[in-house]
Amino acid sequence: MKKQKSIILKMDEPLPISNPFDLLTEEIIFAILDSLNDDAFSKKSFSLVCKSFYFIESRHRKTLRPLSSDLVLRTLKRYRFVSELDLSLCPRVDDAALTQIASSRSSLRSINLSRSRLFTHNGLSSLVANCAGLVEIDLSNRAELTDMAAAAIAEAKNLERLSLLRCKMITDMGIGCVAVGCKKLRFINLKWCLRVSDLGVGLIAMKCKQIRAMDLSYVPITEKCLPPILELEHLEDLVLEGCPGIDDDGLATLKHGSKSLKNVSHVGLSSLTHGAEYLQHLFLAYSLSVTADLAKCLHNISRLQSIKLDGCSVTTSGIKAIGNWLASLKELSLSKCSGVTDECLSFLVQTHKELRKLDITCCSKITYASIDSITNSCTSLTSLRMESCSLVSKDAFVLIGQRCRFLEELDVTDDEIDNEGLKSISRCSKLLTLKLGICSNITDDGLTHVANGCSKLKELDLYRSSGITDEGITAIAHGCPALEMINIAYNDKITDTSLISLSKCMLLKALEIRGCHSVSSVGLSAIVMECRQLMVLDIKKCTNINDNGMIPVAQFSKNLKQINLSYCSVTDVGLLALASIKRLQCMTILHLSGLTPNGLAAALLACRGLTKVKLHTSFKPLLPQSLFEYMEARGCALHWRDKAFQVEIDPKGWEIALWKKS
């Protein structure tokens, strides 16, 4: 009889561990995953470390957004603890799929079906019946849904948030069912529900006493529904944009209304004299003339923090009246307001010194004096937008860098800023967004200053800034490693050297090089090989980019969602290569001389995640009708364009000669 072998471990010897990660508890791993919530790449890498991490990651995930309808059930099998399901990229979810989701996800709390087109009230009934914990449903853009769907939703007794945006077939009867059944509603969006009237809105207000926010934009209601709405004790946000049935007399009821109301948006709010005392945000864009009388109505609302007057006609007396408000404004938008002068703007900023965000885009009458007052009074500004302020001299931009060191966003598009201005602005070390489009006075020297001082920069717009060359872009690439978006469109001095430099910005998500005729597939390949998070790519009119550039795009840009290939030298081969990018949703493919009808049809069929494609009308008679029907059923909209090849007029009215066919 053989002796059995025995193993003796000394007390001071460590136990053999095959996987050191097994020592980490699930709580520790969950804490690590919590810190990676905003980084999908890191999470994926994390789950591939070992089997235990793979399974723990699947238990940790609570939100899920499948890339296509075909992946829904497969991913749900892996992620069994998901409570928030976003199917906005899945247009082909039908009743059977909803039934399967419902049967396997009784703990589901939120579902987004805003792009799903194949399900009916039967699928919704199954979902609601099996998922009693549902608190949020988004059914936006389902114009075919009827009151039967609303009746199915009404069974979700715990529902708190409901969006029926553009559900144009739902009537007061369906909304009444929701009002009776969903007593816990806090938010409802009925924007563009054209068959809903005062009756349905009134029922929601009377039955759902917990409502915090209502969007009734473009709903055919009148002032009759306002009294019950304004009796809502917790109402904070009310949007009434595009409701012509409510006039100033109707809005006068607001002065007897809800004391908790924080946000109001409507075209005629001149009656808000003694309105909601807790009003914090007011939106009056493109609506009325801002006079002293209107401004005085809001004089005593001490909690008002922001006001948006974009596109309104303003008077000096009206702006001065705003300057005298009891409230200390944090945000003010006067974009495209006619009537803004140095006098009134200077007075306003001297009394509202706590401003954090100011938008004076297209205020064409202001000069150096306004910028002097703004920067002297509002030194805590974090955002300044002043596109197309043509009378502001170059010296004024020096003041911005000297006095506003907390700036995070600056838009000086189409202004007179020069290198000295950029040198001063480079002192704003917190700057995240800088827009310098159509700034003809800046050169590489100015960009070098920005690169040296603004290392946190994430977004840079240099559209048509013709003085910029590879030298300036290289400086930005080295000095701003956190760059996520750059626009260097229509800068003819930019070559592949710039793209090779930018490939070091590994967080880059959006690249626009439209009209940069000197870049080629070589530079594009360098970008996509290193910048794996690229989501938006515009290479329109880059005629030296061909199929050799598309192959690496397809191989490395797995997160690409949007691409514009118009006027490039890409053929059927390159377009078909892009079909492997599962996240690709939007394509613009106008005037590709190497594209054939058969190649286009094959690419459209292969790119299964597409939701929007822009095509030239010349292809329409060459493709089968069955293809259009199939694409539409899959949730992809085809937009046909009949643009001429030779000439394009840009927004500034300049005529740009395009490359002609050989």
Image: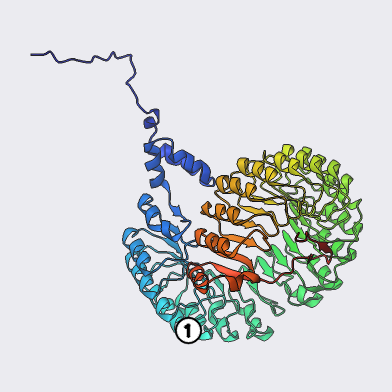
Q: Position of residue 214 (x, y in %)?
A: 55, 72
Residue at the limit of the structure toward the front, as seen here: 662
User: Could you tell me which quadrant the N terminus lies in?
Assistant: top left
Q: Position of residue 377 (x, y in %)?
A: 83, 54
Q: Residue at x 71, y 72 (%)?
A: 284
- Disc 1 residue crowd, few under 14, some 14–19, many 20+, Cα 10 Å: many
Quarter of the view holding residue 347: bottom right
Q: Residue at x 65, y 65 (%)?
A: 280
Q: Position of residue 131 (x, y in %)?
A: 35, 64
Location of residue 335 with respect to 67 vertically, above or below: below
Mark count: 1
Type of amino acid under label 1: Asp
Q: Taking 634 as reference, is 287 left or right?
A: right
Label 1 residue SS: helix
> Is residue 238 in sight in this rendering?
no
| Observer-nearest of 630 and 441 | 630
State the colouring used for the structure image: rainbow
| Observer-nearest of 4 and 160 | 4
Q: Residue at x 73, y 53 (%)?
A: 543
Q: Position of residue 98 (x, y in %)?
A: 37, 65
> Is residue 285 in sight in this rendering?
yes
Location of residue 552 with respect to 316 vertically, above or below: above
Quarter of the view holding residue 306: bottom right
Q: Residue at x 47, y 78 (%)?
A: 144
Quarter of the view holding residue 662: bottom right
Residue bearing the label numbered 1: 172
